[in-house]
Image (cartoon, coloured by chain):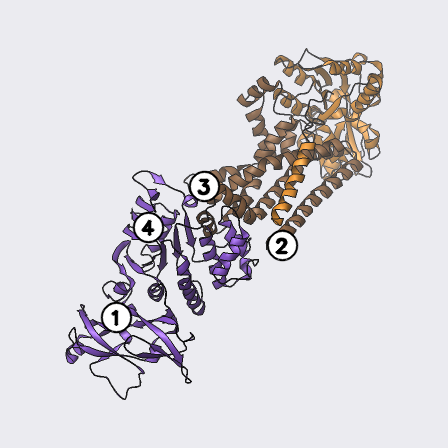
Chain colours: A orange, B purple, C brown
Amino acid sequence: MPVLFCRRHLLAALSSLMLSAAPASAQNEAPVIAAASDLQFAVTEIAAAFTAETGHEVRLSFGSTGNFATQIREGAPFQMFMAADQKFIADLHAEGLTRDEGVLYAEGRLALMAPKGSALQPDAALDNLAALLEAGTLTRFAIANPEHAPYGLRAQEALQHRGLWEEIKPFLILGENVSQTAQFALSGNAEGGIVALSLALAPEVAAQGDHALIPADWHAPLMQRMVLLRDAGPAAEAFYAYVQQPKAREIMVRYGFVLPDEG
Amino acid sequence: MTLKVALRADVPIPLDVAFSVAPGELVALVGHSGSGKTTILRAIAGLWQPEEARVTVAGAVWLDSAAKVALPAHRRHVGMVFQNYALFPHMTAAGNVMAAMERPDRAEALRLLDLVNLHGFADRKPAQLSGGQQQRVALARALARKPAALLLDEPFSAVDRATRERLHAEILALRAHLAMPMILVTHDMNEAQLLADRMVVIERGRVVREGTTAAVMADPDALRAMGIREVAAMLPVTVEGADEDGLTRLDAATGPLYLPGVDSAPGTRLRVRIMAHEVILSRDRPVGLSAQNILPCTVTAIRAGDGPGVMVHLAVGADEIVASITRRAAAQLALQPGDTAHAILKSMSVARDHITGAGRT
Amino acid sequence: MDWTSLTLSLELAAWTVAILLPVSVLGGRWLAYGRFRAKGAVEALVMLPLVLPPTVFGFYLLLAFGRNSPVGAFWQETFGHQLVFTFEGLVVASVIFNLPFAIQPAQRGFEAIAVDLREAAATCGMSPWRSLWKVELPLAWPGLMTAMVLTFAQTLGEFGIVLMGGGSIPGETKTVAIAIYDRVQGFDMQGAGIMSAALVAISFSAIAITYGLSARVGRRLA
């Protein structure tokens, strides 16, 4: 009997834990915004400002644009999608998953980045990188995965333009999204990488590494488009509008984005 | 209250048996390993179902393949004692006994444990009990259910000889309290002869002989499978007293037996198992022999077999013993039914575990 | 320190354990005692999630329960939203993925019970349920305990499946493992470090407490 007692205690404890922790999945009001990883810092700031001003909460989810597109197709409950490349938005729109064609909110830029003390000194012409490759001293170089991360594809184009793609391919490490790429680039395990300028400019990142802006004509433009998805509610709509307003645009500029009508 | 059994099957071993057990009767199912006796017991218990079977107890149908009735084991009112005790290791002795009760009654459990001489052991776990003690708990547990039939599956084969002796004595003492049909599966002929009222000999799944213990044990044909050296008879005696030199005098119907190491008090009634091949016969009372035991008797029958031996049945007063001698010897002595003779037995020939309580007789 | 994601992970682990406990007992027992021809196939099927990498598993779940599947369509009809990318979806995924952890040790626990003990229970008049409660569970519980601890720990740390089929939605599917991943990507090493330490501490204490309690119970039974 004493044995049973003890087991009953365990069972009672477990069930009260479960009951009190009934799933928090009861519909949370704040809409979820899917945003490309390069917006990690910029949009977090914008969202904080939005909440301070309007009192509306939004929930942010950062990741690779390609992955988000797939998840949205599978029914992910995002209400707004801020992509790093407009092609993904166009495809989703064609499939009827978006409210409209969306709107261009920024143009992204590439930055060559290297941790402080790396053998690679970032320069805009990528000459130092070429030199490392020539000398055979490059061990690893990080870019985002070109298959589903727009910044990765653009990095590939830039490297191709500079004629370094074939040589550098064996040394590439691919980040699942451009944030992870920045991680890899600064981890000390690579000489550096190509990341979003918006990440390189973030204080947390800038403290650890140096960067150089890669010429915009070396790659197809990173036309970053955002769109409201089918089930978007009023809070998402409000945020969508907010991103296009001066306060938000000013934050974007601070993170190195080029605003659409300023070219 | 009678247990009636009829079973037939082809797998896993061929079986075709039918027998019955009266209330209060203990029937021994004997045979070699593989003969099917344990399988039969498991079928009665409900642990195995043969193709065709009918098992009834006191009119309640436990198994009837023709009528598609097959009560699961837990719904048959059976008490079973397993060879390896099968006590629940996480329960005390009392707990084990109460596990078999519908409404756990600790007082009743203690009473049953007393009955099997385990007073004071109620709160010990099986790991703290010896083999013999565990088997007693198993017996108490089997009885706790007030079963309609008691089944014992080689219950004493896992304990040592001395313990087995004690347990045999206890079972015999217990018989007075047990009113249900009982089946004992064993390959130990001594055990069968000591405990059983009737015997069913199983060979290759079939009944080859059935009858009272005395009759079966005196019949070499019946015991062909178990071996002719198992032929024996139980002789009732009364303890007269112990002598100083270590021999005890036991009075049989026609004379005394002197046997070593019998602890019982004067006046106790015992039975002695006398192996047929240990008995020497002579017409006249012999003198100058070392053997201390010389019993006058009368030849009642002489049965010849295929071999060089014959089985001589002898009356010792109202009791019977058997002697296995050669045909030549029988001819030399010119023995005939009705003749008087003397049965000679060495004191040292009788094993300690061949002497037991009087049982129900 | 992201408390929401931590509680989310704990809730997910608790629900998974709660749902799998009866499955563990009944499934483990059925496989331990059963002698049927398809037994090998069933055991292999139960083991399947172990063979698949969590991301592959998450991918298949997305296909099987997503918007374009019968289950997804039914869910949408009935509840007005998808099963995938919700907490319930994670629970479903977690329950399926943890089947091998929940069933296998339990099965071994029941197998370890000598056959004649179960037969003795039957001849004592115990129905299969009574036998389960009074004889088998007291003897098989270490296996069950292992099963539940493994399930709990495994779910707390689950990443690949949640990544694929969760969507990292704060308060819904952003479990602590995902949150740590996010922190690292956000260059918040301190935050990541604090949450990782918290996760390790909680998992460790949960396991230590469980085994401590079980040792005490075990001593009573011995």
Residue type, numbered disc 1: Ala
What is the C-alpha distance between the residues marked 2 and 3?
A: 36 Å
Vertical side of B8 occupied by B221: above or below = below
Q: Position of residue A118 (x, y in %)?
A: 80, 38
Same-chain status of marks 3 and 1: no
- In the picture shown, does residue C91 fall above or below B132? above
Q: Are marks 1 and 2 in contact (CB under 8 Å)?
A: no
- For the residues labelled 4 and 1, the Cα–Cα distance comes to 30 Å
**Which quarter of the figure has residue B246?**
bottom left
Q: Which residue is mark 1?
A: B318
Q: Amino acid at mark 4?
A: Thr
| Of the pair C81 and B141, the residue shown nearer to us | B141
**In this rendering, which labeled residue sits more in front, label 4 or label 2?**
4
Looking at the rendered structure, which numbered label has been put on residue B2? 4
Tag 2 residue: C219
Sequence-earlier tag: 2 or 3: 3
Q: Is A261 in front, or is B273?
A: B273
The residue that mark 3 highlights is C40
Kindly indicate the quadrant of the structure image that contains residue B52.
top left
Mark 2, chain letter? C
Label 4 resides on the chain identified as B
Identify the image quadrant of the N terminus of chain C: top right
User: What's under tag 2, amino acid-wise?
Assistant: Arg
Task: From the top left corner, tell me how far across and down residue C160 is, in percent.
Answer: 64, 34
Residue C195: give x, y in percent of width and height. 75, 37
